[in-house]
Image (cartoon, rainbow, N blue to C red):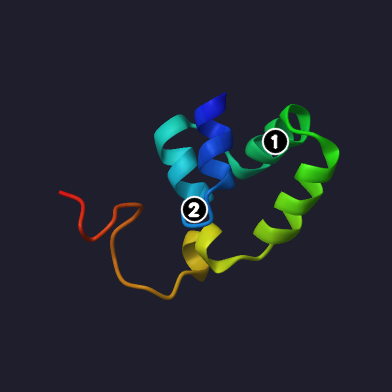
Amino acid sequence: MDRIIEMAWEDRTPFEAIEYQLSISEPEVIKLIRREINPSSFKMWRSRVKGRATKHQQLRTFGHGRFKCSRQK
């Protein structure tokens, strides 16, 4: 549970990476976040994440690689 919330909170971790690693879709992640954190934090997170290019693989403009830093082996 904590790892899902952590990954969802990170701006550069796309929902597709969460689904790939943990088999939880974006709507399920949103439901989980809504249930587990306080309402004001959820509103802040949702407004920040909504439409953010880095949270959606198709909207990303940078090169290849799914969810791995270029300096990571």
Q: Residue furthest right?
A: 39
- Amino acid at the residue labelled 1: Ile
Query: Which mark, by number, is residue 33?
Result: 1
Q: Position of residue 26 (x, y in %)?
A: 61, 44
Considering the numbered disc 2 on the image, is that residue within a helix, a strand or a loop?
A: loop
Q: Position of residue 22 (x, y in %)?
A: 46, 31
| Quadrant that contains the N terminus | top right
Q: Residue at x 77, y 36 (%)?
A: 34
- Residue 51, can we see it? yes
Q: Mark 2 vs mark 1: which is more N-terminal?
A: 2
Q: Residue at x 65, y 57 (%)?
A: 49
Instruction: From this view, report whether residue 61 is shown above or below residue 7.
Output: below
Q: Residue at x 53, y 56 (%)?
A: 11
Name the foreground residue: 32 vs 44.
44
Query: Which mark, by number, is residue 68?
Result: none
- Amino acid at the residue labelled 2: Pro
Label 2–label 1 contact, CB within 8 A: no
Would you call the spot at circle 2 few (<14 residues within 10 Å), some (14-19), or many (20 or more)? many
Q: Position of residue 37 (x, y in %)?
A: 74, 33
- Residue 24, can we see it? no
Considering the numbered disc 1 on the image, is that residue within a helix, a strand or a loop?
A: helix
Residue 6 relative to residue 40: left or right? left
Would you call the spot at circle 1 few (<14 residues within 10 Å), some (14-19), or many (20 or more)? many
Q: Residue at x 23, y 61 (%)?
A: 70
Q: Quadrant of residue 47?
A: bottom right
Residue 15 relative to residue 42: left or right? left
Query: Which mark, by number, is residue 14?
Result: 2
Q: Residue furthest left?
A: 73
Residue at mark 2 to residue at mark 1: CA–CA distance: 15 Å
